């Protein structure tokens, strides 16, 4: 399963009013103030990661598991219409790629278009894993929080985690020997 693009510093994830795959339906956009949120909402976008904090200290809260199920259902509901549209485009592209009256470079372009449409159809046919999507949002939140921690603290945290992992391996070894 493909995932949305990672968040920037001051952004939230928005569900676009169109899009039949996770990367085309869920996009990171600024969500810093009420004015920005209102502008996107008027365009039909829906904020799915709840942004909290101020200025550069903003963190995108992940959607709840129920919200993830609703997001997945909404994206899946768009897929049939998108597959129909792509099927129509594919038929047009195939006709133009075989048309002897059309210039050679246009036929070549249509053959590339056919490959792109086939790839898009495969992406839509891929099932959406709600649990993996939820884990993605959780990981993005963790990364946003870590990005706000000064580098020297992150290094200390990494050393502590490594030490804990080594201690765990040592205890596993002692268990095996016992």
Image (cartoon, grey):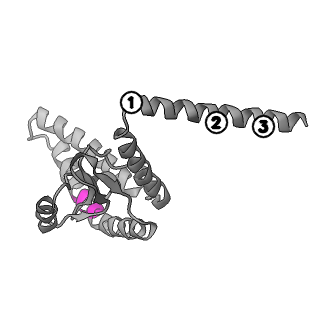
Q: Nearer the viewer, residue 114 or 79?
A: 79
Residue 112 picture location, percent across and down: 23, 38
Point out the residue furthest to the right here.
178
Q: Nearer the viewer, residue 60 or 89?
A: 60
The answer to whether 128 is drawn above or below residue 9 in the figure is below
> Which image quadrant is residue 62 in?
bottom left
- Helix, strand or loop at disc 3? helix
Q: How crowded is the residue under tag 3: few (<14 C-alpha within 10 Å), some, or many (20+)?
A: few
Residue 2 badge: none
Residue 177 picture location, percent across and down: 89, 33
Residue hosting label 1: 151
- Helix, strand or loop at disc 2? helix
Residue 83 part of the magenta segment: yes
Q: Nearer the viewer, residue 43 or 64?
A: 64
Give me the C-alpha separation between circle 1 and circle 3: 32 Å
The earlier-in-sequence mark between 1 and 3 is: 1
Give me the C-alpha separation between circle 2 and circle 1: 20 Å
Quadrant where the C terminus is found in the figure:
top right
Left or right side of 51 for 129: right
Q: Please report the bounds of the magenta region as a residue range.
A: 82-88
> Which image quadrant is residue 165 in?
top right
Residue 172 badge: 3
Closer mark to the observer between disc 1 and disc 3: 1
Closer mark to the observer between disc 2 and disc 3: 2
Residue hosting label 2: 164
The answer to whether 113 is drawn above or below residue 71 in the figure is above
């Amino acid at each position: 399963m493909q995932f949305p693009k990672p968040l920037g510093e001051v952004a939230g994830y928005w569900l676009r009013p169109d899009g039949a795959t996770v990367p085309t339906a869920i996009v990171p956009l600024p969500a810093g103030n009420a004015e920005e949120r209102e502008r996107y909402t008027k365009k039909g976008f829906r904020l799915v990661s709840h942004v909290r904090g101020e200025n550069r200290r903003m963190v995108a809260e992940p959607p709840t598991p129920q919200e993830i199920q609703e997001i997945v259902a909404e994206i899946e509901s768009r897929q049939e219409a998108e597959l129909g549209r792509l099927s129509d485009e594919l038929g047009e592209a195939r006709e133009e790629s075989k048309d002897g009256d059309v210039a050679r470079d246009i036929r070549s372009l249509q053959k590339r278009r056919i490959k792109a449409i086939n790839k898009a159809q495969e992406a839509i046919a891929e099932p959406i894993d709600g649990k993996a999507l939820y884990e993605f949002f959780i990981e993005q939140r963790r990364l946003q929080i870590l990005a706000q921690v000064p580098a020297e603290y992150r290094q200390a945290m990494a050393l502590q985690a490594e030490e804990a992992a080594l201690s765990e391996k040592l205890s596993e070894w002692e268990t095996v020997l016992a």
